[in-house]
Structures are given as structure tokens and as C-alpha cells.
Image (spheres, rainbow, N blue to C red):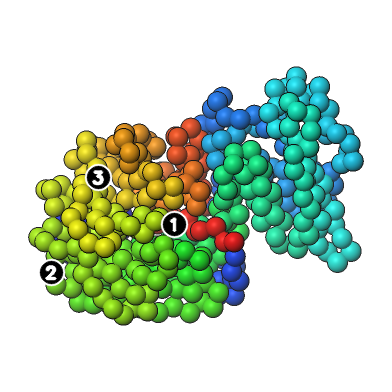
Amino acid sequence: MEMRERMVRRDLGLDRRVFLKAVGLAGIAAAEPAFAQLFVNIQGVGANQFPIAIQPFFGNSEAPENIAEIIGNDLVRSGFFRLVSCDAATALDKDPDWKALSTAGVGAFADGSVTRAADGRYEIKFRLFDPVKKQETDEASYISPKDDLRLYAHKIADRIFERLTGEKGDFATRIAYVSQQGKNNYAIMVADSDGYNPQVALRIRHPIISIDWSPNGRQIAYTSFETGKPTVWIHDLSTGKRRQVAAFRGNNSAPAFSPDGGTLAVALSKDGGTKIYLLDVNGQNLRQFTTGNSIDTEPAFSPDGKYIYFTSDRGGNPQIYRKPVVGGSAERISFGNAYAISPAVSPKNDQVAYIVRTGGHFKLVQQDLATGNVIPLSEIGKNESPSYSPNGNMIIYASEVGGKGVLSTVSTDGSTRSRLSGTSGDIREPSWGPTIK
């Protein structure tokens, strides 16, 4: 089992053996060769997705990034769209070839241009069309530095997504994860939502687990083993400064920010068995949240701040529970599996994702909170650490391929999956950052 799983097993009393062990980016260093670019492999696009054609942008061959390709990959990863090949663009001052679009069965069409300015920046223009109504439905123009071309392509994908679905897109967001390159080489990485442009936020010689973003996207909380035991830290991404906020007797782990960013829920074993505590983000005002003889760990706030979901063995086996933040009784959420851990609550507040164990292997599932219906979202394997995208339409989680840790994303209907993998080492503990307004 990996570090997180060993930690959870220890907290839950399942293994009593001692375990081994947007904002400026001024505090983040560009990725070095050991922490190189991730590779994306999209799988499982079905026939029921909305058909869209993204025409290669005029003049794009002079730019270092393929804008149309980035937009298309974003939309396909969401699970809402499938790409249709159709050469329908004529010129930016003219309508597309409506007949060609109709023949190809295109439901939406986008084209644009990329023009390099004298100062080295690029002007990106895009247009979106409704082939059925034969009319333009959106257009925009952006001025982008060379290094931000991918960001603006993600912004265009967000814009298209919102125009066609009515929901906010979240392609121009970031993910954080842990990269391990050897026994004593760990780093917290921050990358674009598709895994590109990885940057080192922190590098240490000790294991890191349980990453969580602050709601404003400026800080990351995590558990580090650098003091000889697990303690909780908060890291400021703009300055690179960090502070230890929970280093009590015993284990300190599994930090989770409240929706307003002012409170952390943490799992502490300061008084014996592990319980969930709340404390202010400055490390003050500690108060106990769960009580009793059970082992409680892995807290996660609901997006409205009313509940904390957590893993507990109070029923005998680990299951998912929730308890009102204002106090009251804990309610069991997960049923039908003998082992359920690592809850993540959808930003839509209608689903909870978690990991179940089946025959010694681990699978990601999602449960509808209204009906209790549970659907599988991953194959059986070594899957862990689910985290929702900001709009709740995708989940990123850690898995393993060929003995090496990789990251996977899946649309919440299970129709589309993608895999983010590096050239060497393990990547684990993903957390999807918030949308920055």
C-alpha cells in the first residue's frame, strides 16, 4: 500500500504496526528535468457527447502552441463533447461553410486566428457558431504573452463550455500533486488542469500526503513527515513561505480547508485514537469535532460549509460518515461495501466520491446523495485520493500503471477518462484547485 493508504489504515486501527515514516507564482520554481512535463492520454469518448468542430486557427503555425488542439482536448476531457472533423472555415470576416457543417453533423463550430505582434505577444481571436441557426453566438479577442498561450486557450475552452452547457468551465484552473523521484526526493507540483506547465512549489527529502487547496487558490495545506512524524503545514504559493499549523503529540494529518478559508479540519491522535479537530488557519483555537471510541480521519467540508464528511470505523469497518459543523450526530453515508475511505464532496453538493476495496484492490465510486445510488468511475486497481474539479464535472485521482504512480481524470458520468503520467518516478496525491475570479 502507498503512504496515504498506510496512514489511513493506521488511523483506522487496521494496521497497528509502525508505518514507515489567479495568483502570482513568485514562490514556485519552473520544473526541473527530474520533475518533467506530464503526458495526457484521453480515452473512452462515446457517441452521445455533443459534436463540435474546432478549426485550426489561422496563423497558428507561427505560434509555439496549437490553440485549437488545446481547446479541443479540454472539451473532450470534460465528457460533454466529441470532436468532429470538418474543414468549414473560410476567413475570419466571413461565415463558415454552413453546408459542410450540416453534412458533418456538427452541433457547434469554432475558429479563430493567432497573430504575433511586434512586441512578441500574440493576439488570439476566436468565434463560435451555431450551425443549425446559421449564426455566430460568441467571439472574443485576447492579447497573450508567449508563455501564456496555453492559459488563454484554456480560457477560450472555458468560454465555449459555458456558452454551450450553461455551466462555468474550469479548464483554466490548476492541479497540485506530489512527485517522488527516488527515496529522498519529494516535491509538491502545481500544473495546469491538463498537467502541462508543471512547477515546483516545494521540494523536501521526506514524504508528503493529503494536499488541499485554500478556496482562494493562494495556499496549499498538506501533511509532511519532515519532523519525524506527520505534521500539517500551510504553504503560500505566491511567496514560497510556509508555516506549521498542527504539530501536536501523535499524528497530525489530512488537512481540509473550510469553504470560507478560515478554518482547517485535521485528523489528530493527540489524546490516543485519531479524531477530527477544527482549528483556525493560523493554528490557533483548537477544538475537538468528533468524539467517542471510533477512529475518525480524512475530513472534507461540504461546499456549503454545513457538513464535514469523514472516514470512520465506528460501525466496525471503515465507512463514510458526515456530521453537521454546528454539532449533532454523525450520519453514515456509504453502504453496500465493506470498506470505504477518502470522501470528496462535489462542488454541486449532490454527489460524494470515495474509494472502496474489492478483493484487495481499490476502486473509485460516486454516490448520489439524494438517492444513494452508487456508480463505479474507475477500473479496479490501486486507486486513491479523489478530488473534484471546481464545476463538479470531473474528478482527478491517483492510480498506478506498471508499478508507477500516475494521475487519472474521469468525467462524473464515467464516459471519458484521461491519464496524466510522467517519464519517471511516481506522481500521487492530486488536488484540483479552485476557479480564480
Label 3 CA crowd tier, 10 Å (few <14, some 14–19, many 20+): some
Residue bearing mark 2: 272
Residue 186 vs residue 374, the one in the foreground: 374
Residue under the point 44% across and 78% down: 242
As helix, strand or loop, the secondary structure at mark 2 comes to loop
What distance separates the C-alpha of mark 2 from that of mark 3?
Answer: 26 Å
User: Residue 53 at x, y = what percent?
Assistant: 71, 33
Residue bearing mark 1: 431
What distance separates the C-alpha of mark 3 from that of mark 1?
Answer: 22 Å
Disc 1 residue type (three-letter): Ser
Disc 3 residue type (three-letter): Ile
Label 1 or label 2, whichever comes before in sequence order: 2
- Eye-nearest disc, 2 or 3: 3
User: Residue 303 at x, y = what percent?
Assistant: 40, 55
Tag shown at residue 333:
3
User: Residue 55 at x, y = what percent?
Assistant: 76, 37
Residue under the point 45% across and 73% down: 235
Task: For the C terminus, give its image quadrant.
Answer: bottom right
